[in-house]
Amino acid sequence: MRWRYLKQSVFFGLVSASALIITLVLGGIIFYIITNGYSVISLDFITKPPTDSMTKGGIMPAIIGTIYLTVGAIAIGLPFGIASAIYLTEYARQGKIVRIIKIGINCLAGVPSVVFGLFGLGFFVIFLKFGSSILAGSLTLGFLILPTIIGASEEALKSVPQTFREASLSLGVSKWQTIYRIVLPNALPGILTGSILGIGRAAGETAPIMFTAAAFFTAKLPSSIFDEVMALPYHIYVLATAGTNIEATRPIQFGTVLVLVGVVLGIDLIAIIIRGYMRRKKRW
Amino acid sequence: MDSHIIKLHKVNFYYGQTQALTDISMNFGQNRVTALIGPSGCGKSTLLRLLNRMNDLIDGTKVEGEILFEGRNIYAPNIDPVEIRRKVGMVFQKPNPFPKTIYNNISYGPKLTGVTVADMDSLVEQSLRQAVLWDEVKDILNKSAMNLSGGQQQRLCIARALAMKPDVLLMDEPTSALDPISTAKIEELIEELKKDYTIIIVTHNMQQAARISDETAFFYLGNLVEYNKTEKIFTNPDVKQTEDYITGRFG
């Protein structure tokens, strides 16, 4: 009896310790970024372009660029992802072909992001002649997050009770209307929850946009989706590796990292708010 | 039993390799209540779901034979199952209202199936009255249907089916998830609905079949063992197996 209690407390201690370590590491990273980066954060930093070979000034074009690219990636990844998931869960006959497609999607999720970048360069930038642009970068990022969105959407669609589908179909409502009016609205909170992960990843990736969208430096804001943009992750990479005076840009690097984390959290927050709003309406 | 709204002729049904129904021939009378009884897995629910083509939703099923609804074979290639389901409504074992308002639960079907409804409000009221739910919900039509009790939800599901103005109402153990008082209400309701609709009900509850149905069909292992007037089945069945089941000797 004693022994069992002892074992229980040992295991309980181990799992608590793991949770604590994770939290500490995360907290440590954030603390480190904030302490090193907060000094450069100012209104000018987020509203002005870089100056003096990027050793002074702000990072406004990179913030705007990252927002454009992320929104573009969502605009491409979400519809395609949800549509694919609807096909896989609602229409396709479950069997060998669907299994192969699902394995393919899972493999896609494991492909290194630089491969997506090269694909984007070869296909969108060169073959389709989009050039290095918001469009090419958004498409590349959209494809990168597609597996995450498909996976999340599949889970969310499957979690909608089968009885809802049956009830709707038994009324003589067509399959598409059933999906559109009943299944999809009830799956949307779940779809968004899962997609948040993908969206955060899209905002923070460097490799996929390196060859497809990101500019080393451009002070002007993009005027069309065929323009190049600066982007926060790439800007950090540039400051840390390719600047003329890397040491002088150190505080700006940390500031940029802080802003990037803030932007990603901001995008997540919007999705969380939308999800919370929709969840309040969902009850079964 | 003069007019038969549904006629089955030598119907076989398979889930993949497994035969679930064997050689079923039977007719369902118009404006009658027919009860389908039998032990679990005997095929009675499968048969019910054949009548509005709900078995189509399951991959790898096969139907043989003829099922005529108002004279048309509903498994003929030119028949749209969606069309059939508008005429043959269904109520399920567990109440399954949509997570919408009470009003929108009722208006959902008519709105989406392209039926032109001159006055949706009165259709909603009429359907809820038919399901004897109107007085309980008339002041909360814009509240979520999920707040209703189980019995109220089931009557809402009946009202939802009635709003499509079907000819036939299929009920798959509609009271098995309900308490005795709600069950009694649903049974009274079936009695009332029979004037306007043909009702086919699957039930595990022998007393219920005896109380509410005009005809009773007893199934066993995918076969139709006996089909007769309810009174006859429950007092003097022709087949020994039927008697054994009804008296509780097996099942």
Image: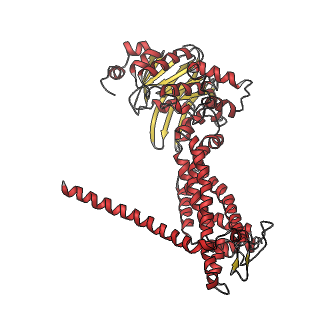
Of residue B222 and residue B188, the one placed in the foreground of this image is B188
Eyeballing the image, is A109 above or below B61?
Answer: below
- A282 and B64: which one is in front? A282
Left/right of residue B173 with respect to residue A272 in the rendered view: left
Quadrant in which residue A243 is drawn: bottom right
The colour scheme applied to this rendered structure is secondary structure
**Who's the residue at 40% across and 16% down the image?**
B233
Return the residue found at the far right.
A223
Q: Position of residue A29 (x, y in %)?
A: 50, 70
Placement of A219 over or under B3, stated as above or below: below
- Asked which quadrant contains residue A242, the reply is bottom right
Q: In the rendered view, does A187 fall on the left or right side of A122?
A: left
The picture places residue B85, in percent across and down from the top left corner, at 61, 31
Q: Residue furthest bottom?
A: A244
In depth, the one of B209 and A212 nearer the eye is: A212
Q: Position of residue A133 (x, y in %)?
A: 75, 70
Q: How many marks?
A: 0
* Residue located at (50% from left, 34% from top): B12
Left or right: A89, with B180 as reference point: right
**Location of residue A213 in the rendering, given as x and y in whole percent from the top left corner:** 71, 72
Residue A204 appearing in the image: no
- Res. B87 in view: yes
